[in-house]
Amino acid sequence: MIKVKIIYKNQKFESLEVSGHANFAPSGSDLVCSAVSAVLTGGFNNIKDENSLSLKLDNGYASITSKGEITKHDEIVIETIIVSLKTIEESYPKFIEIKQID
């Protein structure tokens, strides 16, 4: 199962961590892993101010952590990633679980 942890502090984005594999289908054919990977890779590629964020993207793991004030553009990108992941979770709740801490 893919586990997603989202943390907000004082109503501001703090971090996003994604780990694991969906195990929806064999490696290379896993629709859920492919969808999550596409959302994360596309989002990471659209981040503009890497000085305000710490980004890690690896096989089975991704994280975004705020290091300070986030630009409006990057805030929108992060929220788009989160909404996209929640949409995947709605369709495949047995394969991706999102926990949000406010």
Image (spheres, rainbow, N blue to C red):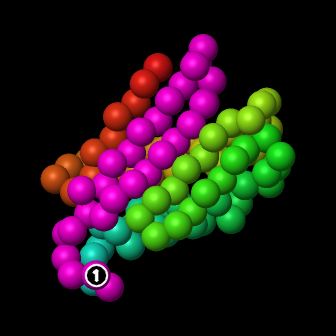
Residue assigned mark 1 = 27
Left or right position of 44 against 59:
right
Vertical side of 62 occupied by 6: above or below: above
Q: Position of residue 3 (x, y in %)?
A: 33, 48
Q: Say if 58 sits above or below 87 in the image.
A: below
* Residue 87 in sight from this viewpoint: no
Quarter containing the N terminus:
bottom left
Number of on-image labels: 1
- Give residue 52's position: percent from left, percent from top: 79, 41
Q: Residue pushed farthest top?
A: 10
Would residue 66 be seen by someone viewing this image from the given angle?
yes
Q: Residue at x 34, y 59 (%)?
A: 20
Residue at point 35%, 34% (across, down): 99
Q: Quadrant of residue 72?
A: top right
Q: Quadrant of residue 71?
A: top right
Residue type, label 1: Ser
Residue 43 locus on image (x, y percent): 61, 58
Q: Nearer the viewer, residue 7 or 85?
A: 7
Q: What range of the chain is rendered magenta? A: 1-28
Q: Residue at x 21, y 68 (%)?
A: 23
Image quadrant assignment for residue 47: bottom right
